[in-house]
Image: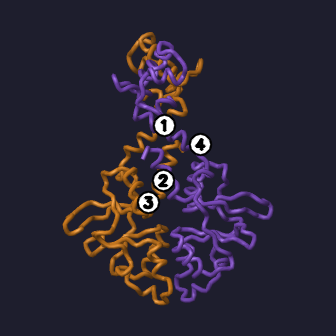
Chain colours: A orange, B purple
Amino acid sequence: MEIVRKSGPITGKRIAEQLSLSRAALRPDLAILTMAGNLEARPRVGYFINKDMRTSFQSVQAARQKVSEYKAHPIVIQKSATVYDAIVQLFLEDVGTIYAVDENGHLAGVISRKDLLRATLGNKNHEELPISIIMTRMPNIVMIEQGETLLDAAKKMIDFQVDSLPVVKEIDKGTHTYAVLGRITKTTITKAYLEILGQ
Amino acid sequence: MEIVRKSGPITGKRIAEQLSLSRAALRPDLAILTMAGNLEARPRVGYFINKDMRTSFQSVQAARQKVSEYKAHPIVIQKSATVYDAIVQLFLEDVGTIYAVDENGHLAGVISRKDLLRATLGNKNHEELPISIIMTRMPNIVMIEQGETLLDAAKKMIDFQVDSLPVVKEIDKGTHTYAVLGRITKTTITKAYLEILGQ
């Protein structure tokens, strides 16, 4: 299956060569895989993966894919910044959520478009507000670690109703100290969804 | 495979009964599906779907699933409303994007959190602005129709960099007249992603 997936369409002869087997020895296995619908065979073309099965490899692969491989660059801002600074940063970087960090670069808060919009409501001087007043703070920030899967990330975003997860590395759990390594968003998941379906 | 997927683990005897076949007639097929790795068999338990294969059904299914089955209720606002009205509506309904409609309920524009935030930038009187000034208008609105797939929707959101697609029914293409039937967002796709991976 691996050989056909990489090199298909491929003839039985060439598969046999790659496995250092005789064609006769291989024939029963190819027959089983074809009858079961995993492979399709066409005369003078060879064996190729059944389209319906192809997606299975991709989705199994995707379930195993780690946050570390998919994370985007985190967009951060100093926690002493103002709401105006945050809105400008958001537009400059064209992201939906930015992360506030302290002087050591450790995660201090999360600011979404929703938080910023809420701050503007009925508040003429919202632009001068410090972001520390409106941001989601520790220990309420929903985070994800490098070794977790995209599946874990998708679950967290649905369960906690957030659009973006900071990818963090724990420095000290007791004091809620985390380094910010990246971001995973619903856009990341939408791209992963396309990948699974072979697009 | 359908029977095992629905009722597995299930014994060969019960599968044969459901298909009105003798166990002897069914045995070669079950043997092939087991050898090919599509089914797993355990003594005294029966047949069940191989875990790696299980996802394939789900993803094939998902690729076939239509926007009509997944769409959420559309959140609409009259196109004569103000930015303040739109922000309030957005918070009341807890959505990221709302659709502006004309007096006939036809789609006139799309207003995202991003559009609203942009309107607030450096504009003390933004709340009194009419949304018709800031919304994305026809013919620039990215839409999706009922009969298209979630895959089509995911592609459009990535290609056009939008977070939400109005689900529409064409009334008159020449005059860009569309009825609004629902919405598909990156949250919809994130949920579909979890579904594909069996979560």
Question: Could you tell me which chain the residue with mark 3 belongs to?
Answer: A
Query: Considering the numbered disc 2 on the image, is that residue within a helix, a strand or a loop?
Result: helix
Task: Let me know if marks 4 and 3 both belong to one chain.
Answer: no
Whole-number angstrom distance, CA of label 2 to CA of label 4:
16 Å
Residue that appears at 43% across and 80% down? A85
Q: Which residue is mark 4?
A: B64
Dot 4: element: helix
Q: Position of residue A49 (x, y in %)?
A: 51, 29
Q: Which residue is mark 1?
A: B56
Say which element carries label 1.
helix
Q: Nearer the viewer, residue B57 or A44?
A: B57
* Upstream in sequence: badge 1 or badge 2: 1
Per the model, the C-alpha gap separating discs 4 and 3 is 25 Å
Name the residue beneath numbered marker 3: A185
Check contact, mark 4 vs mark 3: CB within 8 A.
no
Q: Chain of mark 4?
A: B
Q: Position of residue A156 (x, y in %)?
A: 38, 58
- Amino acid carrying label 1: it is Ser
What amino acid is found at the position of numbered circle 4 in the picture? Arg
Quadrant of the rendered image containing residue B111: bottom right
* Label located before the other in sequence (4 or 1): 1
Q: Chain of mark 2?
A: B
Query: Residue at left 60%, top 62%?
Result: B73
Real-space CA distance between mark 4 and mark 1, rounded to the nearest whole angstrom: 12 Å
Instruction: Please say if A21 is above or below A62.
Output: above
**Is residue A121 left or right of B51 when viewed as pictured?**
right
Mark 4 or 3: in front is 4
Residue ID for mark 2: B191
